[in-house]
Image (cartoon, coloured by chain):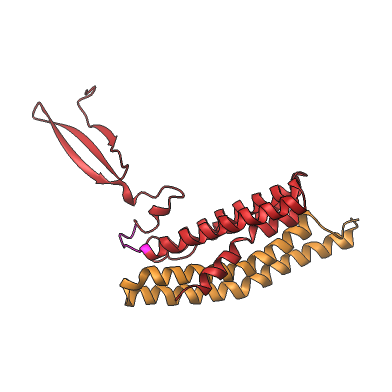
Chain colours: A orange, B red
């Protein structure tokens, strides 16, 4: 793998993780805030709120995982490596 | 049996492992007095026990545990189905990779559920430990030639159809 490809892969991996984590991070923060407020207001609905929060987190965090997987593939199993 | 005049503790876990008895022998005025303390061990969090999720808060949330169990069951069913299909059409290596990926996906979801279960009670944030699971999966898949990367990643994402089905079936 030549140096240009290596450098581009490393930069792309960093961008994939960094940019891919911004949106889910904001979303998870606001979702957790809403869930904790909801549990504090309605403790009897804790199970339902936590379940919905878990599903939401799983969906949101998969976006981070996509970026992470792309970055790891670029770093450890680069298809552009000659 | 007391070997020293100091404090001697004996830990006895009962059958259910949820409570433990502490026998404390304290020398008072030349007489050794035995006192017993029954401690509830349910607040101790074993690493991955499903029943340990909400015991720290003491709040009963059966719905949350039921949801997790339903998702796990559905993921297992989808894993068995997908591994069978992959083994039939793509070979044993792809199906083994898919199986490893599915197991890591289940482990990831378990860690995520554990983090969400602790949110607001013993932790103020949801941990990011679960993100190490796909990292390790990709690293292992790239290191070991017995595992394929793409089937392993597809297997890892097998928990998502189960989540979608569960989400659609929610009232």
**How many numbered circles are shown?**
0
Q: Is residue A41 visible?
A: yes
Q: Residue at 62% across / 60% down in the picture?
A: B158
Q: Which one is nearer the viewer's eye here, B39 or B145?
A: B145
Q: Is residue B140 left or right of residue B57?
A: right
Could you say which quadrant of the image residue B34 lies in?
Answer: top left
Q: Which image quarter is the N terminus of chain A in?
A: bottom right
Q: Is residue A6 left or right of residue B113?
A: right
B123 drawn magenta: no
Q: Which one is nearer the viewer's eye here, B98 or A49?
A: B98
Q: Give x and y (percent) for residue B147.
A: 74, 47
| Residues rendered magenta in the picture | B56-62
Q: Give x and y (percent) for residue A30.
A: 49, 77
Q: Is residue B93 left or right of residue B121?
A: right
Q: Residue at 44% across / 68% down in the picture?
A: A51
Secondary structure mostly taken by the magenta-highlighted segment of the chain: loop
Q: Is residue B133 visible?
A: no
Could you say which quadrant of the image residue B156 lies in?
Answer: bottom right
Q: Which one is nearer the viewer's eye here, B94 or B45?
A: B94
Q: Give x and y (percent) for residue B57.
A: 33, 60
Q: Give x and y (percent) for residue B160.
A: 60, 65
């Amino acid at each position: 793998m030549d140096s240009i490809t290596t450098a581009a892969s490393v930069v792309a991996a960093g961008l994939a993780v960094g940019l891919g984590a911004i949106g889910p991070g904001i979303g998870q923060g606001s979702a957790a805030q809403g869930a904790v407020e909801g549990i504090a207001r309605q403790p009897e609905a804790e199970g339902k709120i936590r379940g919905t929060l878990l599903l939401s987190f799983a969906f949101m965090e998969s976006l981070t995982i996509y970026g992470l997987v792309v970055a790891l593939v670029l770093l450890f199993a680069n298809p552009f490596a000659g | 049996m007391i070997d020293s005049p100091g404090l001697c503790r004996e830990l006895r876990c009962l059958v259910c492992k949820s409570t433990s008895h502490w026998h404390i022998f304290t020398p008072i005025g030349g007489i050794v007095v035995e006192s017993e303390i029954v401690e509830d061990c349910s607040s101790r969090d074993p690493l991955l026990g499903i029943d340990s999720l909400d015991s720290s808060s003491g709040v009963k949330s059966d719905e949350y545990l039921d949801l997790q169990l339903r998702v796990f069951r559905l993921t297992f069913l989808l894993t068995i189905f997908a591994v069978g299909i992959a083994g039939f059409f793509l070979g044993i290596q792809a199906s083994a990779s898919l199986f490893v990926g599915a197991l890591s996906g289940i482990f990831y979801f378990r860690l995520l559920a554990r983090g969400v279960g602790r949110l607001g009670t013993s932790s103020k944030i949801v941990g990011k430990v679960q993100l190490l699971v796909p990292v390790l999966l990709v690293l292992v898949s790239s290191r070991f030639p017995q595992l394929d990367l793409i089937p392993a990643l597809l297997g890892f994402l097998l928990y998502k159809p189960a989540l979608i089905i569960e989400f659609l079936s929610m009232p």
